[in-house]
Amino acid sequence: MISSIKNYLSENTVLLIRMDDIAENMNWSLMKKCEDLFDELNIKPLLGVIPKNADPELLKYDKSDNFWQEVRNWSKKGWEISMHGYNHVYGTKTYKKDYFNYGGDSEFFGLSLSDQKIKIKNGLEKFIKEDIQIRSFFAPNHTYDLNTFKALGECGIINIIDGYGIFPYSYKNLNFIPQLFYKEIMLPFGIQSTQIHLNYWKEEDFKNFEKFLRRHQKKIVSFDNILNKVKSGFFIYSINFALKNCIKISRTLKRSQKL
Ligand SMILES: [Zn+2]
């Protein structure tokens, strides 16, 4: 029985590659290297694109003159384009009162519902103008409050690439696909997204990333793959499956202790 659980978990252990801070200004030479690697290994990452980047830290990087054409090209390859904030400028502090208790600065936390909605709407309009479909969102610095979720829902975005846990879950009619680690880590089970910040990488980090991808290539899936599992109720089934088998094991153990 234990081996059947092990097999089940192994078969359903996958990772989505989430790339953060994709904008006109970024580390383009490393992005090109990642793109070649993804193409070679047939990996379809999720890119967190900032629709109207005004973050002074990010503006220091090289600018691409045909950024939106690049985004359309990535989208055509089946890479998922996600909205990462609106302008990535931090205007509030959360004092750990943000929804996930990360703390730190925020672009959204503490703003009124209507202000948050305006940001999200303006971001979505930019993507529509550039002919890019958006189905998901994640906030800069992981910082949300309940108004952020309400604003997203009201703007028709129901998938958030953030949160704790080992499986995606639903809350307030939104799907959360957890993101736990800052480094590429393959958990022994569960469905996760990883967080990649190319701008802070050195050559050595790219080499480690390449090694990681080659090693876990078969476990890396697209956003669509995870979305299909969410839609099919796979996660509820998985939790029930695990619970049922844990109960069975504990009963078997109790019985054997009595013998
Ligand atoms: Zn960011």
Image (cartoon, grey):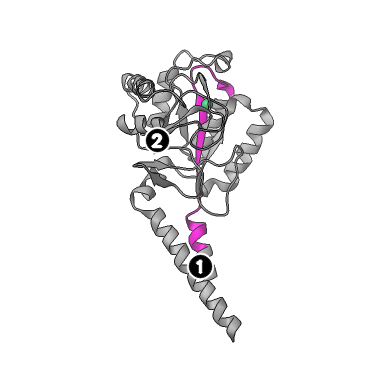
SS at circle 1: helix
Residue at point 61% right, 37% down?
209
Q: Does the magenta stretch include residue 176?
A: no
Say the numbered circle drawn on residue 78. 2
Q: Name the residue under label 1.
A: 246
Marks 1 and 2 close (CB-CB < 8 Å)? no
Q: Is residue 135 left or right of residue 38?
A: left
Under mark 1, the amino acid is Cys
SS at circle 2: loop
Q: In this view, does 125 lie to the left or right of 162?
A: left
Residue 134 in view, yes or no? no
Residue at point 51% right, 63% down?
7
Q: Which residue lies furthest to the right in this view?
A: 204
Front in this rendered view, residue 101 or 16? 101
- Mark toward the start of the polypeptide (1 vs 2): 2
Front in this rendered view, residue 132 or 142? 142
Q: Give the range drawn in magenta.
A: 7-29
